[in-house]
Image (spheres, coloured by chain):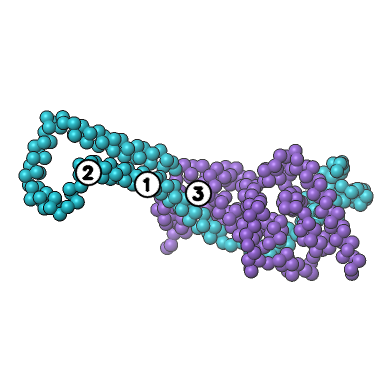
Chain colours: A cyan, B purple
Amino acid sequence: MNLTSCPYEKEVRQLMARGQWPDACPAELRTHVSGCRTCGDLVLVSEAFQHARAESLAVARPVAPAVLLWRAQLRRRNAAMERVSRPLLGAQIFACAVALFAAAGFAGFEARNGVAWFTLSYWHDWFVQLPQAAMAQWDSLSPGALAGPGWTWMVLALAVAMLVLLGGAAVYFATDKP
Amino acid sequence: MAPTDKRTRMPWEFTLPHAWAGGSEEAAGAGVCDPAMENEAFAGFYERSARPLWAYLARVSADPALADDLMQESYVRYLCAEGSPTLARDGEAAARRYLFRIATNLLRDHWRHPRTASIEEIPEEFFAARGQATQTDAQILLAPALRQMKPRERQMLWLAHAEGYSHREIANVMGLHAASIRLLLFRARRKIAALLRACAADDGRKS
């Protein structure tokens, strides 16, 4: 299809926009429009759309603006809540995974040392020896006692756990962008 | 005496704590959730733009119920959008164009993923039923002619001939290149003019 523009098209468009078509326009222009396909199409289509617009404006029943403001406020609030809860959920999943990992490590460590703590007599003895054992553990917390190989692993595990938790907190603050 | 100065009144938006309202200082600075905009300014803007927007949506979609939904959604998105034009900063024309752009995108999304038909949906004859006495031939024929046009053509024609937007403004609203609008609009106008004339001829033969 060839795009053949008419030199009068702009003038006709302006007259229509100002509401001067057809009464307040020169007779020559009306004669031109009746014979020009481009201008004829423009007038026909513009009139149809303008009338349809006027009719639609009359039947429109918009809701009160306060309703829209309220809905927008609600949506913003929900979006803010979602923004806050997303990193929290991530941190919770991360913490859960760390806890499961620690529990699995503890279970594995205990399994290597036997399963005596499953028996009732083990717990009975444990309760009986608890006061003495507590005193002994308190003594073992001295700096000299911490140099043993078992404590080295414990300290290392605690350091790793601390790093993991701090990493989780760092991830939380990094993703908590407004 | 009750205070009448509007500066002393607390807008209803501020009755919720700021954090719960979902606002932020940055957002307010960017014109988003601007309380001033959300009161008298927005009400005035809404009063002037809601009916033309509804007319656009209703005529282009041929579904007044859908137009109601999409119009509300357009305003809500406009109010929530970050970096949307504000009346104070960009002027009403820019805000209005942005609103039409949101509505155009919503219509496009609707056509891509049409929802199931609602019993409340009113057919196109809804328009004919109201004010039929004042209808011209072109109006009676416009609805069937529009139905035969592609959605994009309907949008373009409405923006150009009902809203009086320039090619550049239409391109801005529809997300197309301004250079292609001229040709696309020319073709669409020629097509709908032929349809209007054909419908008018059929109507004349019947009567």
What amino acid is at disc 2?
Glu
Res. A90 image quadrant: top left
Q: Earlier in the sequence, mark 2 or mark 1?
A: 1
Q: Chain of mark 3?
A: B
Residue tagged by mark 1? A93
Residue at point 84%, 57% (across, down): B196
- The answer to whether any part of residue B49 appears in the image is no
CA distance separating discs 3 and 1: 33 Å
Q: Quadrant of the N terminus of chain B?
A: bottom left
Quarter where residue B198 is shown: bottom right
The amino acid marked with disc number 1 is Ile
Give the image location of residue A70, x and y in percent.
50, 58
Residue A59 horizontal/vertical position (percent): 68, 64
Gap in Å between the C-alphas at discs 3 and 2? 58 Å
Give the left or right position of residue B186, taking residue A178 as reference.
right
Viewer-closest of B101 and B5: B101
Q: Position of residue A130 (x, y in %)?
A: 9, 47
Task: Say few, some or many: other residues with alpha carbon within 10 Å of mark 1 (under 14 / 14 to 19 / 20 or more).
Answer: few
For image coordinates 74% across by 70% down, the residue present is B129
Circle number at residue A110: 2
Badge 3 crowding class, 10 Å Cα cut-off, few under 14, some 14 to 19, many 20 or more, is: many
User: Mark 3 sits on what residue?
Assistant: B33
**How packed is label 2: few (under 14 Cα within 10 Å), some, or many (20 or more)?**
few
Q: Label 2 is found on which chain of the structure?
A: A
* Element on which disc 1 rests: helix
**Chain where mark 1 sits:** A
Q: Which mark is residue A26?
A: none
| Secondary structure of residue under mark 3 | loop
Q: Tell me if B188 is positioned left or right of B118 in this view.
A: right
Up/down of B10 relative to B206, above or below: above
User: Marks 3 and 2: CB-CB under 8 Å?
Assistant: no
